[in-house]
Structure formats: C-alpha cells, structure tokens
Amino acid sequence: MYTIHGADCDHYPGDQIMSLLRSHGQFRVTGLYLAHAPGAIVAGDVPNVSYADYVLGWLDAIPAVGFSTALYCSQLVTDWAWRHTKIVWSFHIPAGTEHQKYDPDDLPHGIVDPGCVATQFRQNITLNGIPLSLIADSGGFDLNLRRIPDPSSLAVVEHFLVS
C-alpha cells in the first residue's frame, strides 16, 4: 500500500510548503501535485486567467527547488494540464456521491481517466467500521484508482509515460 501526502497552499509560491518539503527528511517525494482550487474553471475546459497564472507560476518554481512538476485537476482540464506538465492526476467525482458511506469490502467502481497516472473518484466518504484517524482530513476518506504502482515515484511515472 502506498500513502500519498498532499499539502494545500492558497498562495503562490507556497514558501512554507517548499520549506517543509526541503527541511524534513521523511518526505520521499520527487513530484509535487498541485491541487486545483474551487472556482478555477471557466468555459468548461480551461482555468480562469488568474488561476492559470498561479498554476504556471508554481510549475516554474517547482524545478528550482528540486522537484518534478505534476498537476491534480478536474478531468475537465486535463488537456490544458498536459500542455504544461506531463504528469496529471485527475479527479472525476460523480455528482451526489460526497459524504456517502460504503462497506470496505464492496467499494464502488471507478475508472482512471485516459492518460492520467491516477484518478480520484470519490471524496469525503466514510467506510463502515473504519474510523477517521486524527491526521486524516476531517471531511472523510477519498478514493483513488491508479494506473501505475506508485504515482509518487518519478521513475515509475516516467516509465509509464514512455510505455
């Protein structure tokens, strides 16, 4: 089992996040997936201009601190994302599925969006008999499917991209 840690930052260039990643040896990360902000899409398939500028600023800053770029975004903007980075983790969450409760032995099916290393297909759910830990997001668990064994490993991701 792989654990992928995320960090949310609501401003560019995310100096606190960069300092944290550089200063803590326990982070074994080669890529940084920048999450998509609410309200960042207009016209259905592209981020609005201010958010696009924010994303492009992050993508310019990440290599300078020793990480590879990757984006976590809606399936609606994956074409735009691929124009700026080769590693994309999408979210494609069906309407009305947030905060649902599932049996861990009978989870809903999902798909990995074409060309993506992984896709989140449920958000803020609960699992019968499995309490949320104190370090988990208090909203609930998220379910993701991955196309590759470890989306946090640049070597694994690059192998996927060339095969």
Image (spheres, grey):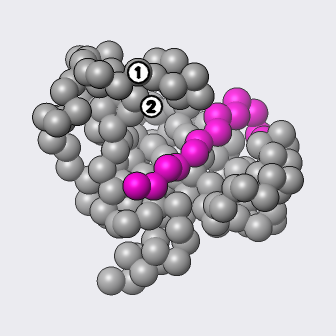
Q: Position of residue 53 (x, y in %)?
A: 67, 44
Question: In screen coordinates, is 51 left or right of 87?
Answer: right
Which residue shows up at 35% across the image and 25% down it? 130
Q: Residues within 10 Å of mark 1 (few under 14, many from 20)?
A: few
From the image, tell me which residue sits under label 2: 42
From the image, tell me which residue sits under label 1: 131
Q: Nearer the viewer, residue 27 or 97?
A: 27
Which residue shows up at 51% across the image and 18% down it? 138
Give amino acid for label 2.
Answer: Val
Picture layout, residue 126 above or below residue 150: above
Picture layout, residue 100 above or below residue 91: above
First-in-chain label (1 vs 2): 2
Give amino acid for label 1.
Answer: Pro
Span shown in magenta: 1-14
The quadrant in which residue 5 appears is top right
**Element class at badge 2:** strand
Q: Position of residue 31 (x, y in %)?
A: 61, 61
Question: In screen coordinates, is 148 left or right of 46?
Answer: left
The verdict on residue 28 being magenta is no
Asked if one can make out residue 98 in the rendered structure from this viewpoint, the answer is no
Question: In screen coordinates, is 73 left or right of 149?
Answer: right
The verdict on residue 5 being magenta is yes
